């Protein structure tokens, strides 16, 4: 739908008649627009974007069709005054811009009032979230619980997101050419298949027992699907045990997968495919985060 604005005429959300868009807060049609905009996004993305838009609604206190560029700039100024990181402010304003662009494509707005809105610049923090190889290996090797050991191993070896990890069922795992593969339903409702080397596949398959095809691979102590918060605790505990003092999260192991694979010569398009990045430009961030070479090597010694 987003790629074919000419087809959106029949999907246009008409404003309510009789001046119903006046008054404080979003209109009923605004809320419907938000749901259409969020539809198909990942659960975590929906949660974050919904929180961003609710924050904007609380600031603007008017229907979206009455919002001006001055309102949007004022919202940006308010965010700058709050104790938020530059990246959080950038993401919040990006979400608002995305909503207005979506509404314009649906012809809900006559024009995109948020188009001129400038996003705040922020310093790239990716390099600080990439651990050394030996730190990751210590985290994995130090875990004695078989389930938790496999979680750490798979987060790193497959580069999966934590939401993708806990959603895996045994139906998603298949043997393949001496190893195995997992089918991941990822961000943006995109499905990708990730190859697992023999050691990872053997460790994974050994935990199945008599579990049914639709049973979750990673099970909580109560027998249900493991919650993402539990995975966060497992990763943080493993980091402390390994002597890593940084505030490591499961997503850090995904960063490490990309960086370490590229450092060892993996083709960038293969890393992009494994991680499910929509653009190779996203994957290339890892090349710039920890460069292996510098032109300073060619300068005269001082």
Image (cartoon, helix red, strand yellow):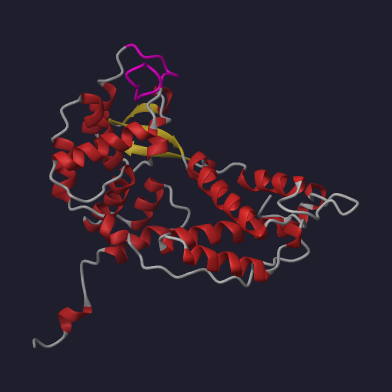
Q: Residue at x 21, y 37 (%)?
A: 237
Q: Position of residue 210 (x, y in %)?
A: 33, 11
Front residue of 204 and 155: 155
Image-based side of 160 in relation to 153, left or right: right
Which residue is the extreme one toward the top?
210
Residue sitting at x 54%, y 65%: 78
Query: Compared to 15, does 110 lie above or below?
Result: below
Task: Provide residue 172's location: percent of width, then percent of height.
Answer: 42, 28
Residue 232 position, x and y percent, is 32, 38
- Relative to 154, 15 lies left or right: right
Which image quarter: residue 168? top left
151 vs 206: above or below: below
Q: Nearer the viewer, residue 87 or 299?
A: 87
| Residue at 62% in and 42% down | 39
Magenta highlight on residue 278: no
- Left/right placement of residue 61 relative to residue 74 reads right
The answer to whether one can see residue 68 in this image is yes
Segment colored magenta: 210-224
**Is 218 one of the magenta-colored residues?**
yes
Q: Residue furthest right?
A: 18
Does residue 38 sit above or below 19 in this rendering?
Answer: above
- Front residue of 130/17: it is 17
Specify whether residue 202 is in view.
Answer: no
Residue sticking out furthest to the left: 302
**Considering the image in quadrants, where does the C terminus appear?**
bottom left
- Main secondary-structure element of the magenta-colored stretch: loop
State which quadrant residue 104 falls in: bottom right
């Amino acid at each position: 739908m987003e790629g074919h604005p000419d087809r959106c005429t029949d999907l246009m959300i008409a404003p309510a008649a009789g001046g119903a868009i006046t008054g404080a807060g979003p209109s009923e049609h605004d809320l419907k627009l938000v749901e259409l905009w969020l539809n198909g996004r990942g659960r975590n993305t929906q949660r974050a974007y919904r929180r961003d838009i609710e924050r904007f609604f609380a600031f603007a206190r008017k229907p979206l069709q009455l919002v001006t560029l001055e309102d949007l700039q004022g919202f940006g100024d308010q965010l700058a005054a709050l104790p938020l990181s530059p990246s959080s402010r950038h993401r919040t304003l990006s979400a608002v811009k995305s909503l207005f662009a979506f509404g314009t494509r649906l012809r809900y707005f006559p024009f995109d009032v948020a188009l001129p809105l400038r996003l705040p610049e922020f310093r790239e923090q990716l390099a600080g979230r990439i651990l050394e190889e030996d730190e990751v290996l210590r985290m994995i090797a130090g875990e004695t619980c078989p389930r938790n050991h496999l979680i750490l191993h798979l987060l790193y070896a497959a580069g999966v997101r934590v939401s993708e990890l806990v959603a895996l069922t045994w139906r998603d795992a298949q043997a393949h050419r001496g190893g195995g593969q997992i089918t991941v339903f990822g961000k943006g409702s995109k499905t990708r298949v990730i190859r697992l080397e023999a050691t990872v596949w053997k460790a994974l398959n050994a935990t199945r027992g008599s579990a049914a095809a639709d049973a979750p691979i990673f099970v909580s102590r109560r027998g249900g699907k493991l919650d993402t918060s539990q995975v966060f605790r497992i990763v943080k505990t493993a980091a402390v045990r390994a002597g890593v003092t940084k505030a490591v999260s499961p997503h850090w192991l995904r960063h490490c997968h990309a960086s370490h694979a590229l450092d060892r010569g993996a083709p960038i398009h293969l890393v992009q495919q494994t991680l499910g990045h929509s653009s190779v430009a996203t994957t290339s961030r890892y090349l710039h985060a920890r460069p292996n070479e510098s032109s300073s090597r060619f300068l005269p010694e001082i």
